[in-house]
């Protein structure tokens, strides 16, 4: 419930005996709540003016309360201290008026869904305790059927029982003396603890997901989009400020109900036709895969209906839609008019589809021609690019061959130079080897000559010594000269 020192804000309210709310107010925010069996629903809070005060009229009260009952699925009827016969009579007036407008559409069902009597300032908690248990006991005592009661009272109670799917009552204690102070601004700390305790019980009970009921119209769930249509239709019926005729209200309800049926049927037709037209070109199953993921085929894959498949599908769906309308529980006696309107809407959509298909085919033809030109241009560009590439490759090959030949020549020249250099070096080495061999031979000859001279000298010396002993000086001299000449001769001969 929040902090206890914060003033109360939200719907406008004030201290005093005069009413603050006039007409019907809606909270500026829509609350999304996930409830069992229905999933996520939108919850809209509504506040209406008090009924039967000293400034209101019967027509005004009936208008406001009837509007709230027509629009709401969970109704809270705020009464003071007790439920008495006048409260039931006031409720009877609202119920009878609204039921006159809905009796043809309920088919034996209750006209409304849930009503909870909220009895404020309950003065007898010792008899019936605060809360739902005491409220149930109090409600049963006022709605039970008793043969001893006057016929008017019994009829009143019976009508109230038949008007709602669920009737409940909650008894609330007094909020305390401080709330009667003119300076009271709604702070929780100024409210009595018992009252706060029961607020913590009744508010979750009213708004908890398991107790919320989605709005229904003639047994069909109402969508957020349809709620707007309901407001427009009901306000149109009540906007004159005078109490409208029951048939005017019924026509407003029938309009909302029948519009929902027509919209659903047309949506089914559009979905089926959209799938048929898409599948006409779906050779590879691509569109079928898309249809499995989308609610309605909206792609522009329309085919020329040469074999009449689309026309046959249109006629088949047209008959099915008309049959569905006849079995949908249309409200009112305008079935023939609605059937004609449905046929016209279907034919109009089919005619628009034909025009769209023709326009798409013309665009497709233009697109195909454009694609053909683009393909030709691309092929021409491709050929030019290919020729340019081939020419470039040829030039590169020629350049590579020239470079290869040039490199080969350079390698051959270099190889010839290397061979010449090698031959030159070989000749130098051979020359060096011959020179060294010549020098070696000369050294050997010189060495042998020296050895020979030494031997000759030795022999001569020995010979001369021997001759000197036997011969004279001149003979010895002649022998020496002969020996020298012989040695020189041997050297030159060698």
Image (spheres, helix red, strand yellow):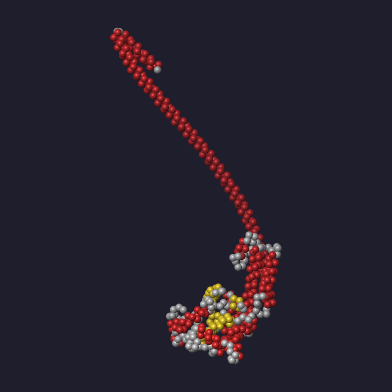
176 relative to 486 in the view: left or right: right
Outermost residue, front side: 147
Q: Nearer the viewer, residue 322 or 395?
A: 322
**Residue drawn 61% across the image and 54% down it:** 378
- In the rendered view, would you say 259 is above or below 291? below
- In the rendered view, would you say 141 is above or below 304? below
User: Which quadrant holds residue 184?
Assistant: bottom left
**Residue drawn 41% across the image and 25% down it:** 437
Looking at the figure, which quarter contains the C terminus?
A: top left
Mark yes or no: residue 154 visible. Answer: yes
Residue 142 x, y percent position in the rendering: 55, 88
User: Which quadrant holds residue 94?
Assistant: bottom right
Outermost residue, right side: 307
Q: Nearer the viewer, residue 398 or 481?
A: 481
Residue 182 x, y percent position in the rendering: 45, 87
Residue 91 x, y percent position in the rendering: 57, 86
The number of numbered badges drawn on the structure is 0
Outermost residue, left side: 469
**Residue drawn 65% across the image and 70% down it:** 269
Mark yes or no: residue 19 visible. Answer: no
Residue 283 x, y percent position in the rendering: 64, 60
261 relative to 20 in the view: left or right: right
């Amino acid at each position: 419930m929040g902090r206890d020192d914060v003033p109360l804000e939200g719907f406008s309210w004030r201290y005093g005996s005069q009413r603050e709310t006039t007409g019907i107010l809606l909270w500026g925010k829509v609350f999304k709540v996930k409830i069992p069996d229905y999933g996520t629903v939108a919850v809209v809070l509504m506040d209406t003016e008090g009924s039967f005060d000293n400034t209101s009229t019967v027509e005004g009260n009936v208008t406001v309360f009837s509007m709230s009952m027509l629009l709401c699925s969970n109704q809270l009827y705020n009464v003071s201290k007790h439920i008495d016969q006048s409260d039931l009579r006031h409720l009877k007036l609202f119920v009878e008026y609204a039921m006159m407008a809905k009796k043809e559409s309920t088919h034996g069902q209750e006209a409304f869904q849930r009503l909870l009597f909220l009895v404020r300032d309950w003065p007898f908690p010792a008899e019936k305790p605060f809360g739902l248990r005491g409220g149930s006991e109090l409600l049963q005592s006022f709605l039970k059927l008793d043969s001893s009661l006057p016929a008017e009272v019994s009829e009143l109670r019976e009508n109230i029982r038949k008007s709602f799917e669920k009737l409940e009552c909650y008894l609330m204690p007094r909020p305390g003396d401080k709330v009667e102070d003119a300076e009271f601004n709604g702070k929780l700390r100024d409210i009595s603890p018992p009252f706060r305790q029961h607020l913590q019980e009744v508010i979750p009970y009213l708004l908890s997901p398991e107790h919320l009921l989605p709005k229904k119209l003639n047994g069909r769930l109402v969508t957020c989009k349809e709620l707007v249509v309901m407001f427009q239709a009901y306000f149109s019926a009540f906007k004159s400020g005078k109490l409208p005729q029951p048939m005017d209200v019924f026509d407003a309800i029938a309009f909302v109900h029948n519009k929902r049926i027509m919209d659903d049927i047309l949506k089914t037709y559009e979905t089926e036709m959209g799938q048929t037209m898409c599948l006409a070109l779906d050779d590879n199953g691509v569109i079928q895969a898309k249809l499995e993921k989308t609610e309605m085929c909206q792609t522009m894959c329309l085919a020329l209906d040469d074999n009449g498949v689309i026309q046959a599908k249109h006629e088949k769906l047209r008959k099915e839609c008309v049959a569905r309308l006849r079995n949908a529980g249309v409200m009112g006696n305008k079935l023939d008019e609605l059937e004609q309107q449905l046929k016209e809407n279907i034919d109009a959509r089919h005619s628009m589809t034909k025009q769209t298909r023709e326009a798409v085919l013309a665009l497709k033809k233009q697109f195909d021609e454009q694609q053909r030109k683009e393909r030709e241009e691309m092929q021409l560009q491709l050929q030019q690019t290919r020729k340019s590439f081939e020419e470039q490759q040829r030039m590169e090959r020629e350049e590579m061959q020239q470079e290869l030949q040039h490199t080969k020549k350079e390698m051959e020249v270099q190889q010839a130079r290397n061979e010449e250099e090698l031959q030159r070096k070989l000749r130098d080495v051979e020359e060096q080897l011959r020179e060294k061999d010549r020098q070696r031979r000369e050294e050997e000859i010189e060495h042998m000559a020296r050895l020979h001279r030494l031997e000759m000298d030795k022999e001569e010396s020995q010979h001369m010594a021997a001759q000197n002993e036997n011969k004279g000086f001149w003979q010895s001299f002649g022998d020496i000269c002969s020996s020298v000449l012989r040695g020189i001769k041997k050297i030159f001969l060698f």
